[in-house]
């Protein structure tokens, strides 16, 4: 392990950080001991470089196929890909039954811990019984292969049982994060035409039992597609009951047979839809299928985290409502027969050492979380993790947003005893699995860099014209070869799929995927992700579109116009700052109205979209064609000197805005 000369430390996401990134010269090589025992070696890169399709065929052999495929990749109808053509498999069988059949039924699959401190230990044999019962219950409700099921649950084992029961039956799940509002749930149920919603009576959040089913009641009021609502009893909250529609989990599922024989489905059978924010107001239903997705989830989980199923205890701190939870709480780890930890609650309930207590108790050896969480722990103080025995940890992962070098170093030093490899993993809901990341036994890492593409993956950084930039250069991140876990489309909107991802760049070899992220090669060719280049914000690792928040604001009767920007935030990466013009031109910047508007956004989308700051302004900066110049508003929100204002239709507007803001509120 070598630590070379230190680069300047800085806060995240600021212009200063980006400059510092280019100067980063510290590198951390894997220890010899780690490298010797690692799952992945340099040979993996060589194998993929020699023959990409043969490489992926080998990776698909991690899975059990009922019928083998006849072709690895069919890209003839690009950008619509087919992987492992003709192959048939059952995703749930691969995640559960085959491990039980191989004699691992007594191995713990999930150490679950509830926020109030209750626990559940679920072995692979238990998982087989629970998922079989759930599958039988879904059959009894009349669900049929291809139907969509919305899952709106907190982080409880039933969320995993539900997802796997859907996979087992060939139902397509759409998990909706439990922090989303009734309105957000409603649009997702409608778009997918879900036939069933699975929810709970409530969820534990910061020591309180919050309601959940009441949001479902509102969301399904006019939803013709929904025949039933299946309700898990978690908190004991009182709930309204519609006897024609609602069914208790403990009455229906718990009385089912523990046996269910899975059938195989086509490799391209839809496994799930997951909604994510785009640049317009409507979230996109990202569609993933079975064989390729599971191959990439299992391959990346095995190699990036160096998982040893017999000895490791793995913990991904995400929520199953996000793609990280899909690929790295459920499908990847279970396909690899991991023993995982799953935690229901918040990291500071009942105290700020809760996570480290969990690491100590279960001897967690691999931890995967987001930079925003790491920065929160930094804020709480070094002495908190120092109170616990974290010596079991041997690999640390980061995901969801650019990690600033300072947070990377803190993570390694204070959580990883200055010895564990840190893997910064770049990917997206659309990519299905990790794409750019170090391999912990191979790559010499630099704090803050995701380093390079994984074996089998191809990415480039290109300029406006699609030409690859050289080392030291920056531009747009693109993926120029199809990959097994790639999205297969946007649910119900073929054109939007083409327009959003495949229309900006292309090559003679075919269409090229535009990721929407800016990136740079440093002088050694390492990749540094620089954040979104579109109107999508990244708040605590969650994607939220500026338009979505603007639509929510203008749906309030007092708001005439709104413009929203993501401004650098030391903890959450970006914070949402909204500029609003009130109706009738009134300049009411009173606290009461601002609070009302923040709550309104929370009700329309969910608490994660609540603006950090709302500024009432008399005007918004627009170009001559009427486009809001968010760049200038970002300058205001980040207290920077204003950039170029010459394209403004009325250049005095910025003075008006700035002077309005100077006024005490
Ligand atoms: C950002 C989360 C920098 C990026 C898995 C991407 C990252 C968006 C990283 C996808 C990283 C994710 N470094 N940025 N390691 N990982 N991002 O769909 O902007 O919720 O486009 O998927 O998060 O967010 P999503």
Image: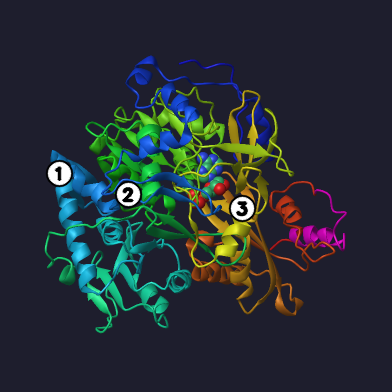
Span of residues in magenta: 643-661
Q: Secondary structure at mark 2?
A: helix
Magenta stretch encompasses residue 651:
yes
* Side of 560 where 111 appears, left or right: left
Magenta stretch encompasses residue 232:
no
Of 299 and 517, the residue lying toward us: 299
Of 656 and 215, the residue lying toward us: 215
* Side of 660 where 367 appears, left or right: left
Q: Residues within 10 Å of mark 1 (few under 14, many from 20)?
A: few
Q: Which residue is mark 2?
A: 330
Quarter of the figure with the C terminus: bottom right
Residue drawn at x 34%, y 69% is 147
Q: Which residue is mark 1?
A: 101
Nearer the camera: disc 3 or disc 2: 3
Is tag 3's residue or tag 1's residue first in the polypeptide sequence?
A: 1
Image height of 100 relative to 309, above or below: below
As drawn, the label of residue 502 is 3
Gap between marks 3 and 2 measured at Cα: 29 Å
Q: Residues within 10 Å of mark 3 (few under 14, many from 20)?
A: some
Residue drawn at x 52%, y 71% is 604
Image height of 249 relative to 297, above or below: below
Q: How is the image coloured?
A: rainbow
Q: Position of residue 430 (x, y in %)?
A: 50, 52
Look at the image and tell me whether residue 401 can be seen. Answer: no
Image height of 545 relative to 81, above or below: below
Gap between marks 2 and 1 measured at Cα: 19 Å
Q: Position of residue 550 (x, y in %)?
A: 63, 67
């Amino acid at each position: 392990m070598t630590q070379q000369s230190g680069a300047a430390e800085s806060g995240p996401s600021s212009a200063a950080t980006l400059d510092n990134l280019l100067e980063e010269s510290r590198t951390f090589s894997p220890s010899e001991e780690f490298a010797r025992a690692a799952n992945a070696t340099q040979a993996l890169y060589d194998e993929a470089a020699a023959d990409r399709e043969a490489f992926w065929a080998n990776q698909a052999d991690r899975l059990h196929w009922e019928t083998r495929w006849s072709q690895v990749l069919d890209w003839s109808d690009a950008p619509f890909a087919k992987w492992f053509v003709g192959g048939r498999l059952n995703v749930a069988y691969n995640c559960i039954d085959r491990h039980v059949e191989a004699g691992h039924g007594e191995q713990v699959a999930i150490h679950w811990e509830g926020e109030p401190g209750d626990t559940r230990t679920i072995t692979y044999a238990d998982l087989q019984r629970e998922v079989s019962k759930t599958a039988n219950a879904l059959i009894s409700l009349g669900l049929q292969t291809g139907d969509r099921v919305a899952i709106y649950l907190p982080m409880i084992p039933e969320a995993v049982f539900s997802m796997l029961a859907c996979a087992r039956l060939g139902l397509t799940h759409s998990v909706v994060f439990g922090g989303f509002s009734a309105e957000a749930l409603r649009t997702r149920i409608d778009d997918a035409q879900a036939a069933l919603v699975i929810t709970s009576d409530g969820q534990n959040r910061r020591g309180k039992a919050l309601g959940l089913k009441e949001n479902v009641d509102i969301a399904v009021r006019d939803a013709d597609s929904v025949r039933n609502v299946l309700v898990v009893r978690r908190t004991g909250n009182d709930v309204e009951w519609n006897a024609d529609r609602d069914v208790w989990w403990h009455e229906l599922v718990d009385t089912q047979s523990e046996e269910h024989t899975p059938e195989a489905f086509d490799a391209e059978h839809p496994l799930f839809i997951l909604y994510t924010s785009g640049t317009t107001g409507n979230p996109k239903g990202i569609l993933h299928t079975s064989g390729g997705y599971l191959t990439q989830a299992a391959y990346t989980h095995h190699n990036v985290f160096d998982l040893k199923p017999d000895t490791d205890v793995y913990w991904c701190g995400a929520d199953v409502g996000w793609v990280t939870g899909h690929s790295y709480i459920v499908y990847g780890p279970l396909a690899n027969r991991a023993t995982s930890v799953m935690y229901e609650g918040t990291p500071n309930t009942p105290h700020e050492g809760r996570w480290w207590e969990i690491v100590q108790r279960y001897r967690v050896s691999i931890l995967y979380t987001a930079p925003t969480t790491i920065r929160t722990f930094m804020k709480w103080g070094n002495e908190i993790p120092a109170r616990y025995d974290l010596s079991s940890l041997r690999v640390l992962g980061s995901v969801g947003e650019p990690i600033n070098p300072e947070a990377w170093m803190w993570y390694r030093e204070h959580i990883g005893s200055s010895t564990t490899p840190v893997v910064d993993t770049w990917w997206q809901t659309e990519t299905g699995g990790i794409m750019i990341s170090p391999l912990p036994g191979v790559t010499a890492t630099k704090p803050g860099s995701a380093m390079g593409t994984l074996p089998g993956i191809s990415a480039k950084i290109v300029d406006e014209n699609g030409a690859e930039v050289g080392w030291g250069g920056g531009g747009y991140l693109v993926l120029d070869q199809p990959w097994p876990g790639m999205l297969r489309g946007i649910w119900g909107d073929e054109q939007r799929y083409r327009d959003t991802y495949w229309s900006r760049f292309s090559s003679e070899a075919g269409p090229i995927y535009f990721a929407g992220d800016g990136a740079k090669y440093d002088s050694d060719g390492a990749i540094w992700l620089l954040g979104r280049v579109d109107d999508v914000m990244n708040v605590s690792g969650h994607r939220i579109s500026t338009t979505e928040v603007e639509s929510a604001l203008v749906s309030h009767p007092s708001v005439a116009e709104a413009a929203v920007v993501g401004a650098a935030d030391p903890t959450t990466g970006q914070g949402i700052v909204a500029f609003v013009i009130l109706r009738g031109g009134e300049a009411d910047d009173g606290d009461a109205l601002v609070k009302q508007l923040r709550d309104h956004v929370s009700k329309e989308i969910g608490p994660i979209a609540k603006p950090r700051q709302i500024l009432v302004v008399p005007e918004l900066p627009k170009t001559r064609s009427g486009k809001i110049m968010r760049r200038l508003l970002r300058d205001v929100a980040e207290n920077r000197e204003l950039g170029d204002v010459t394209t403004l239709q009325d250049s005095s507007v910025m003075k008006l805005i700035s002077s309005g803001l100077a006024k005490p509120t």
